[in-house]
Amino acid sequence: MNKAQLVEAIADKLGGRQQAADAVDAVLDAMVRAVVAGDRVSVTGFGSFEKVDRPARYARNPQTGERVRVKKTSVPRFRAGQGFKDLVSGTKKLPKGDEVAVKKAPKGSLTGGASATVKKAAAKKATTAKKAAAKTTATKAVAKKTTAKKATPTVKKTAAAKSTAAKKTTAAAKKAAPAKKATAAAKKTTATAKKTAPAAKKATATKAPAKKTATRKATAKKTTARKK
C-alpha cells in the first residue's frame, strides 16, 4: 500500500478524498518534525518512532570487501507496539467491520497531550544535557589527575638532578681547595727564595776579600823569611 492507496482507504471515513489526503499529510508531517527534533512519537497499540544517533564506525564494501569509514549520523527507528505484533503474529485476530484495529486513546488522554509531549521532550533534553555536562566534568578531572601524576615524577627527577649537580660541585670545590692552598704556599716559597738570593750573593761577595787579604799576608811572610 502506497500513500495514494492509504488516502483512498480512509477517504470514506473522513468525508472525501481531499480531506483524507490532508489528514495523512498532517499526521506524517507532525511525526517527521517531532522525530527530527529528537522527540519520540508513540502511538499506543501501533508503535513508536524515534531518532537514533549512530557513532562513526568502519564498515566493509559488500562488492569489493574494502574497509570504509562511515561518518557519524542519525537515523529514524520504528518499534512496533505489542498490539501490532500480536495482530501480525496471529496471536490476536483483526476486528471485524468498522472497528479500529489499533486501540483508541483512553478518554481524557488527548487533552493537553501536545503540551505534555513537549514537557517530556524538554525534560529528556535537560537530563541528557546534565549527563553530558557531568561526563565532561569527570573527564576533565581525570585529565587533571593524570597530568598531575605525570608532572610529579618529572619534578622529583629535576630536583634529584639539581641535588646531584650541587653535590658534585661541592665535591669539586673541596678537591680544588687543597690545590689552591698548595699553589699559594709554592708562590710564597718562591717569593722567599727570591728575597734570600740577593742577601746570599752579598754575603759571598763580602767574604771573598777576606780570603784574598789572608793570602797576601801569607805571601809577604814567606818573602820576608827568604830575605833573612
Image: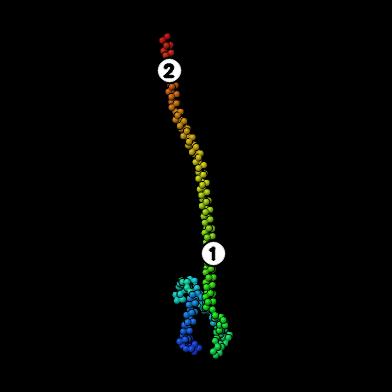
Front-most of 8 and 67? 8
Question: Element under label 2?
Answer: helix
Q: What secondary structure is marked by label 1?
A: helix
Front residue of 63/214: it is: 63
* Circle number at residue 138: 1
Q: Residue at position x 53%, y 64% from top?
A: 137
Image: 73 above or below 12: above
Query: Mark 2, residues whose alpha carbon is within 10 Å: few (<14), some, or many (≥20)?
Result: few
Residue 224 placement (x, y as % from top left)? 42, 11
* One can see residue 5 in this view: no
Q: Where is residue 165? Give x, y as percent.
A: 50, 48
Which residue ends up furthest to the right in the rendered image?
A: 91
Q: What residue type is labelled 2?
A: Thr
Alpha carbon separation for disc pair 1 and 2: 114 Å
> Does 151 appear above or below 133?
above
Nearest the viewer among 85 and 203 is: 85
- Residue at the farthest top position: 228
Q: Which percent across, then down, holds residue 96?
A: 56, 90
Q: In this view, does 209 lie to the left or right of 125?
A: left
Q: Which residue is drawn at 43% across and 23% down?
A: 205
Label at residue 24: none
The 10 Å Cα crowd at callout 1, few under 14, some 14 to 19, many 20 or more, is few
Residue receiving disc 2:
213
Q: Which residue is drawn at 54% across and 70% down?
A: 127
Closer-to-camera residue (223/17): 17
Give the amino acid at mark 1: Ala
Contact? badges 1 and 2 (CB < 8 Å): no
Looking at the rendered image, the quarter that the C terminus falls into is top left
Image point 46% across, 76% down: which residue? Answer: 62
